[in-house]
Amino acid sequence: QVRLVESGGGLVQPGGSLRLSCTTSRSFFSMYAMGWYRQAPEKQREMVADITTGGSTNYADSVKGRFTISRDNAKSAVYLQMNNLKPEDTAVYYCKTQGAPYWGRGTQVTVSS
């Protein structure tokens, strides 16, 4: 059974930073591009960023220049470095395999003073 596990969420003040991590099994991880998604209360889930197996990245316009997605194939992990956080970034953040329907359970990010 495929399992994705996110970590690193929390409460941070506006302008602060957080780093999210997502891990899964090694054999599985090498097969897929990976994405980070988020869902705010009463809003639809949206893609934040994704990264191919080769390392090419793509970002939502709302996070360009503030968020960075990366992956470490040796650790079977994908990361989301989030800088200059804003209250509108508050959401549950999910890790997902791109092209396959596997999701993590999510980690809460709250940006508030």
Image (cartoon, grey):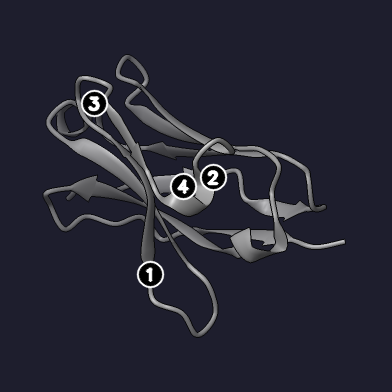
| Residue at the image point whose x is 20% and y is 20% from the top | 54
Residue 64, relative to residue 74: is it above or below? below
Nearer the observer, disc 4 or disc 1? 1
How far apart marks 3 and 2 lie (CA) works out to 18 Å
Residue under pointer 4: 6
Horizontally, residue 1 falls left or right of residue 59, namely left
Q: Residues within 10 Å of mark 2 (few under 14, many from 20)?
A: some
Q: Position of residue 97 (x, y in %)?
A: 22, 46
Residue 75, relative to residue 64: is it above or below? above
Residue under pointer 2: 7
First-in-chain label (1 vs 3): 3
Horizontally, residue 23 falls left or right of residue 34, namely right
First-in-chain label (4 vs 1): 4
Closer-to-camera residue (95/76): 95
Residue 12, relative to residue 105: is it above or below? above
Q: As shown in the figure, which amino acid type bears the numbered disc 4?
A: Glu
Nearer the observer, disc 1 or disc 3? 1
Q: As shown in the figure, which amino acid type bears the numbered disc 3?
A: Arg
**Do the CB atoms of the residues marked 3 and 4 lie less than 8 Å apart?**
no
How far apart marks 1 and 2 lie (CA) works out to 18 Å
